[in-house]
Image: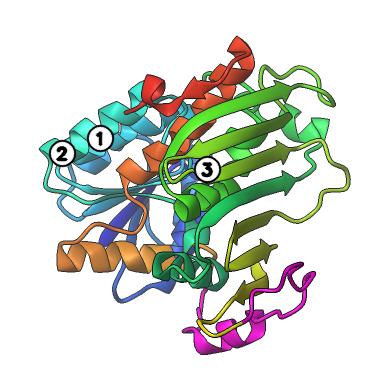
Amino acid sequence: MRFAVLGCGVIGAVHARTIKALAPRAELVVAVDAVEERARAIADEHGVDASTSLDEVLARDDVDAVTICTPSGMHSDAAVAVLDAGKHVIIEKPLDVDLDAARRVLDAERRSDRTAMVISQHRHDLASRVVHEALTAGSFGTVTSGMALMPWWRSQAYYDSGDWRGTVEMDGGGALMNQGIHTLDLLVWFLGEPVEVFAYTGLLAHERIAVEDTAVATVRFASGALGIVHGTTAAYPGLTTRVQVHGDRGSAVIDHNQLAYFHAAGDGDEIRAHGVAGGGNQAEERIAAAAPVDRTTSHSEQFEDFLDAVEHGRPPLVTVETAARTLAVIRAIYTSAEAGRPVTIKELSV
C-alpha cells in the first residue's frame, strides 16, 4: 500500500512515522501540504517526494491511499476527492465538524469500491478490546450506565498557536470535538446506539475562541443504559481520561488507556447485597489472558487493521458510519446546549 500524507503538521508527522514503521506492507510516497516548507520537512525526513497539490498527487499511479491530517473542517472535501479518484482513505479524527460533511463522505464511500477509515486508535487499546469483548459476551449482565470523563488542560497559548484552533469552521467545537472525542467514542462503542442527549457547555477559562472549553451531558442509549459525558480543557494541571461501564453483574474502568478495574460475576458467584466496594479486581488476570499489543505509534494497530481490511475486502473496525455516529452525539451535545432542551440523535442522524 503506497501512501500520501495530506497535512504535514503534528499529526501528519505521526501518520508518516506509522506508515514507515509498517514496511514492507506500507510505503510512504509523498508528503502533501499547502505550505511547501511543511511538506518538505516530512519529505526530507523520510526521503520521499513533497507536493503542495492534492490534485497532482491523486493523478499519480504510485499512490494507492491518502491519509488526511488537515484541520478538521477540511476533512470531508479531501476525503471525497480521494475516494472519487479511486484511492483508499484514512481520515484523522474527527470525521469532519458537521453531519452534512459526514454525509458527503458516506455517499462518496458508497459510490466507490475503496476502503475508508476514521482514526479512533483507542478502540484498539488492549484495555478497550477486553472491555468490548466482555460487553459483547454479556459478562456484565444488563448494562445500566457508563461515563466518559476527560479533565484536561490547554493553555490560552495553545489556542492562540493556530488561527484555526477554537473556530467553529475549522475546529468545529472545543473540548469535546477536538480532545474528548476519543473518550466519548469509546463510551458509544461500549454502550451502543445513542438515542437522546441533554447537555450544557461553557467557555469558562479561555478567551478569543468561539467554542466550548467545558461540556457536560447525559446520553440515553437504545438499550436503556444511561451515560455521563464530561469534557474540558479547563482543568489545570490536567488529569487522565477515564471510561467506566457498569452492569448488574459487573463493571470496568479504563483510566489513562489502562484497565484499572474489571469485575464480572461468574455463573455461580454470590451477588452480595452491598457489592464488594471496589474489591474483586480481575483486571490483571484479564489483561494477562488477552493478546498483547506491540506498537510503534499509538496509530500502528489501527493502520494494520486498515491494511488487513483492504487486503481481505472487509470493513475496518472504525468505519465512516460508526465515526459519524460519534460525531452525531457531539453535534447533539452542542445543539442541546444551545437550545436548552434534550435533542434526539434521530433529529440529526446521518
Q: Give the percent coordinates (x, y) of residue 2.
A: 26, 60
Residue under the image location 57 percent in, 83 percent down: 286
Identify the disc placed on residue 85. Answer: none
Name the residue nearer the viewer: 13 or 176.
176
Residue 325 appears in the rendering: yes
Answer with the quarter of the image where residue 305 lies. Answer: bottom left
Closest to the observer, 240 or 35: 240
Mark 2: which amino acid?
Answer: Arg
Spot occupied by residue 285 in the image (x, y as percentages of width and height): 61, 87
Q: Position of residue 270 (x, y in %)?
A: 63, 80
206 left or right of 77? right
Residue located 64% across and 56% down the image? 243
Distance of label 3 from label 2 (alpha carbons): 33 Å
Find disc 1 in the rendering and name its residue. Answer: 106
Q: Is residue 266 left or right of residue 25?
A: right
Q: CA distance from mark 2 to mark 1?
A: 6 Å
Q: Are marks 2 and 1 in contact (CB under 8 Å)?
A: yes
Return the residue nearer the eye: 210 or 191: 191
Does 205 appear in magenta?
no
> Which quadrant of the figure has residue 337?
top right
What's the amino acid at mark 3?
Answer: Arg
First-in-chain label (3 vs 1): 3
In the image as oriented, which residue stretches furthest toward the top? 339
Q: In the rendered view, tell whether residue 149 sits above or below residue 276.
A: above
Q: Which residue is mark 3?
A: 38
Between the C-alphas of marks 3 and 1, the distance is 30 Å
Residue that numbered label 2 is attached to: 110
Q: Main secondary structure of the magenta part?
A: loop
> Is residue 13 left or right of 82 when viewed as pictured?
right
Question: Quick check: marks 3 and 2 in contact, CB under 8 Å?
Answer: no
Span of residues in magenta: 270-296
Q: Nearer the viewer, mark 3 or mark 2?
A: 2
